[in-house]
Amino acid sequence: MKNFFKTILRGIVKFDLYAYCKIVHRAKVVGKENIPKTGPVIICGNHRSFLDPPLMEVTCGRYTRFLAKEELTKNKFFAFLGKVFDAILVKRDSKEVKALKESLQTLKNGDCLALFPEGTRNGLAKGEKVKDGAAFFALRSGAPVVPCGIKGGEKGNRKVTITYGKPLDFSEYKGSKDKETLDKVTETIMEEIIKLTK
C-alpha cells in the first residue's frame, strides 16, 4: 500500500514539474525515441543548474533513479524530491559501496540510472575532472549509455532544450577493470554529451 501511494505521489509531482518546465522554460524535448523503452539504461547529461535532474526525470519516459549528492538533502525541497524519486545518495568524492551496489542493482532490475559525469554544476567550466562513474556502471553492467545535452535557460532566454542522443554500446568492454578503458569510455561519453549541447 505504501508503494501504491508513493507511485501516485510520484505521478503528481512529475506532472507538476513537467508543467513548470513547459510553462516557465518552454522546454523542448528532442530525441526521446533514442531512449530504450525497456531494459537497463544509463542516462548521462551535462549539469548546469538545479533544473537538470527534474527536467531529465519528467522527459525521459522511464522510471529513473538519480545519483545525487547527500548534501542536497539539507534543502527540504530537494530532500522531498529525493524520496519521491528514489534518489541514490552519495557523499562527495566518495565511492560508497552501498551507493555502488544500489546503482548496479537498479540496472540489474532493468531500470534507468541517471547521473552527471561533471560531478557538479558547470564542472567542465570550473576545470573539474570528469568523473568515471558512468563508464564504471556501463562496464560493470553492460547497459547502454544515452548521452543527453541540455542547453538554454540563461538569463534573458528561459527556453530550455533537452536532447537525447543515440545509445552508446560499450558491451564489448563489459567486465573490464582496466583504467585506460575506463578513461576511454568516459571521454567518449563526455564528447557525445558536449556535441548535444551545441
Image (cartoon, rainbow, N blue to C red):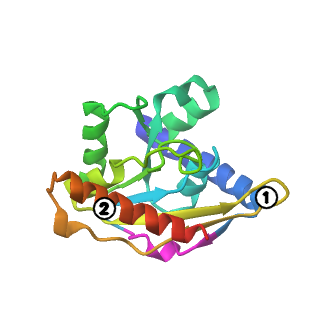
x and y, in percent, of residue 5 in the image: 50, 39
From the top left corner, tell me how far across and down residue 50 is, in percent.
Answer: 63, 43
Q: Is 95 situated above or below 130? A: above
Residue that lies at the very extreme toward the top in this rendered image: 74
Q: Which region of the structure is painted magenta?
A: 29-37
Give the numbered dot on residue 185. Answer: 2
Q: Residue 64 location, x and y as percent?
A: 44, 52
Residue 183 lies in quadrant:
bottom left
- Under mark 1, the amino acid is Arg
Q: Considering only vertical position in the picture, is 129 above or below 28?
A: above
Q: Which mark is residue 43?
A: none
Magenta stretch encompasses residue 80: no
Q: Dot 2, how many residues are within 10 Å of its Cα: few (below 14), some (14-19), or many (20+)? A: many
Q: Secondary structure at mark 2?
A: helix
Tell me the tag on residue 158.
1
Residue shown at 17% from the left, 69% from the top: 172
Residue nearest the viewer, comparing 104 with 147: 147
